[in-house]
């Protein structure tokens, strides 16, 4: 049975709404918004600035989901290829290792 993940409820976060709108507008015209910070996570003594793709992963993980669920939801929003899927799995693993996502039963 695949593990189910959710956001660590102790992580404080802020969506940068103006940058999010700008990133979505860039995607609409075929531009890459990956350099724009649309989400800021604050945890322990650290701050992590993330782009729109990472923000969507964070949004999806509000409720317990499997990594497969995350990929399925992302592919309904963005065009994902094999490399993108691999990057998503690596990013999920990084969030888990930092304690930002937790495994739930």
Image (cartoon, rainbow, N blue to C red):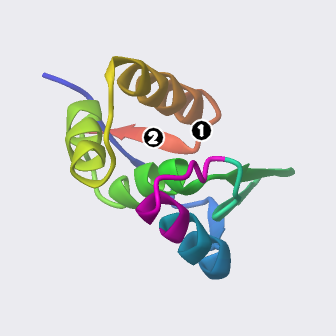
Q: Which residue is mark 1?
A: 99
Tell me the residue that label 2 is attached to. Answer: 102
Asked whether the residues under the numbered discs 1 and 2 touch, taking CB atoms below 8 Å apart as contact, a structural biologist would say: yes
Q: Position of residue 44 (x, y in %)?
A: 79, 51
Label 2 Cα crowd, 10 Å radius (few <14 / some 14-19 / many 20+):
some
Q: Is residue 40 above or below residue 99?
A: below
Residue toward you, 103 or 55: 55
Quarter of the image where one finds residue 36: bottom right
Q: Residue 50: x and y, percent?
A: 66, 51
Q: Which residues are magenta?
A: 25-34
The quadrant in which the C terminus is found is top left
Residue 7 appears in the figure: no
Residue 20: where, in percent of width, then height?
57, 71
> Within the image, what quadrant is residue 12 found in?
bottom right
Describe residue 83's horizontal placement relative to residue 13 as left or right: left
For this orientation, the residue located farthest to the left is: 1
In what element is the residue under mark 2? strand
Question: Which secondary structure dominates the residues rendered in magenta?
Answer: loop
Direction bottom: furthest residue:
18
State left or right for residue 20 relative to residue 36. left
Quadrant including the N terminus: top left
Circle number at residue 43: none
Residue in the picture at 48% in, 24% down:
87
Secondary element under disc 1, as helix, strand or loop, is: loop
- Asked if residue 103 is positioned above or below residue 47 in the image, the reply reads above
Residues at marks 1 and 2, CA–CA distance in whole angstroms: 6 Å
Mark 1, residues whose alpha carbon is within 10 Å: few (<14), some, or many (≥20)? some
Query: Would you say residue 28 sits in the magenta stretch?
Result: yes
Please report the residue visible at 57 percent of the width from the left and 44 percent of the height from the top: 100
């Amino acid at each position: 049975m695949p593990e189910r993940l959710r956001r660590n409820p102790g992580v404080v976060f802020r969506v940068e709404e103006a940058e999010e709108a700008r990133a979505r507008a860039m995607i609409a015209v075929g531009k890459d918004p990956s350099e724009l910070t649309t989400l800021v996570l604050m945890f322990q003594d650290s701050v992590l600035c993330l782009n729109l793709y990472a923000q969507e992963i964070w949004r999806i993980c509000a409720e317990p989901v499997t990594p497969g669920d995350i990929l399925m939801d992302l592919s309904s929003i963005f065009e994902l290829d094999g490399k993108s899927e691999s990057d998503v799995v690596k990013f999920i693993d990084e969030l888990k290792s930092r304690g930002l996502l937790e495994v739930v039963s």
